[in-house]
Image: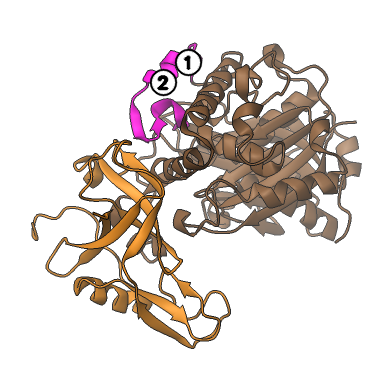
Chain colours: A brown, B orange
Amino acid sequence: MADLSKSVAIVGVAESDEIGLVPNKSALTLHMEATRNAIADAGLTIGDIDGFLTAGYWGYDVAEYLGIKPRYTDSTSVGGSSFVIDIAHAMAAINAGYCEVALITHGQAGRSARYPYGRDPNVPAAQYDTPYGIIGPPVNYSMAASRYMHQYGEERTRQALAEIAVSTRKWAQMNPKAMMREPMTFDDYHNSRWIARPFHLLDCCLVTDAGAAVIVTTPERAKSLPKKPVWVLGAAEYHDHSLLHQMPDMTVTPARVTGPRALEMAGVTHSDIDLTMIYDSFTYTVLATIESLGFCGPGEGPDWVANQRTAPGGDWALNTSGGGLSYTHPGMYGIFLIVEAVRQLRGETGERQLKDPKLSLVNGTGGLLSSTGTVVLGVD
Amino acid sequence: MTSNYKLPLPNSQPESDYYWEKAKAHELWLRKCNECGNAYFYPRDICPNCYSNNVTWIQASGKATLYAYSIVERGPTAPFRDVVPYVAAVVELEEGPRMPTNLVDVPFDEEHIKVGMALQVTFDDVTDEVTLPKFRPVG
């Protein structure tokens, strides 16, 4: 495979004007605001965009709405991981000459959409899962967590999930854009109502309205733009199932493949990473992903996150935006991981800014722990 | 019960009509490949392991162990909100494949439901036309 490490840079990132509860704006308006803001962040104009990547819609529906006529298009839809995987696809397309300035965009009225988002009645889920009430992420991910608890101990797993919920909230308290900024205690976590046992409410991500966009381009172009380029040093994607019952091992995600590959491409190791951004659809997603990425061994995640190690002031920075758990999560969240990583690497995150971070690992998860994309981002 | 059933029914496909017909007869059947020996769920006309068309149907013993479960307290869609709590489960069949199901005939609490516990298939005639295979503890 060609060595594409550091062959493209992220030059623009932004959210929509508002995120959280935004009942007065459609998903496509959120796309459009995020696009406008990301273009401004990059110092570009809409006419510069010649590559277009989105997920959850047919690509031309969104591109038309945004007034974009791309010569490269990609509507890869593997849930919330799509937008992290899109970084790799944009990198490949730019290197192959299919486009020069790629826009990755997302908008979703997860909370306020007027019409429900439905699944294709012809897919296997509709006949094997749906009749049993095995529908949607909380039911499925909580089943996977039950397996982890069985293998590695219920009490220490429960403590780990609580550590993740509480530490993530502490980061959100320093993010003015986060939806949930009230303090959360361990008692708050343990006393929150059951959604799908073993998951409490506070194991589950938010459901919000939000858009975000990311712009990727060549090194030459990046160097002519105002902001510090954030280099794509490594990128990998993988999926190994769709339905949870087809997952090879419910305690190990596809990050077992994408983590090591992305790090190898970047030529760095786990201990080099200054900021880890992990898709936190649920507390359990984080626990399983830390292990799958290879930061620690199977069943060692509870020790890895113990004693608020991932909170502000801890020695392993994780999900500094407040994550899907406390900042925002419109349904497919992966693009927001990239936005935060880029801002941290540029030094733009104010009160929650890490001290001079150089490398960030971003891992998006999609579906029912089905798909992951991992990227390693860095600054000079 | 028949006419009052409010929950979604399976959308059978050409490759799975036989599976649901057998469920209605209170039998659990799986696909098995004659070429590579792979027994698999869910039914596909072509073996997903070796891509042979030479696949047959086998009757499963109905014995299984509990692989993972969730006690659902908040229904994920409107009709399920009326039937909570219920137990969503993935079971591992004696023949190897895993399948999704519900646990029945067991108190819905962590004292009585344990990953790894032995289960036996049972059949729930939810309408005149449709039967769902479910699982209950052995003994």
Q: Is residue A206 magenta?
A: yes
x, y percentage for residue A357?
81, 24
Question: In which image quadrant can residue A343 be found?
Answer: top right
Q: Secondary structure at mark 2?
A: helix
Q: Residues within 10 Å of mark 1 (few under 14, many from 20)?
A: few
Q: Amino acid at mark 1?
A: Phe
| Marks 2 and 1 belong to one chain | yes
What residue is shown with label 2? Answer: A190
Check the picture and name the quadrant holding the C terminus of chain B.
bottom left
Residue B56 is at least partly visible in this image: yes
What residue is shown with label 1? Answer: A186
Q: Is residue A320 magenta?
A: no
In the image, the segment drawn in magenta is: A180-207
Spatial separation of the CA atoms under disc 2 and disc 1: 6 Å
x, y percentage for residue A118?
37, 52
Q: Is residue A81 left or right of residue A46?
A: left
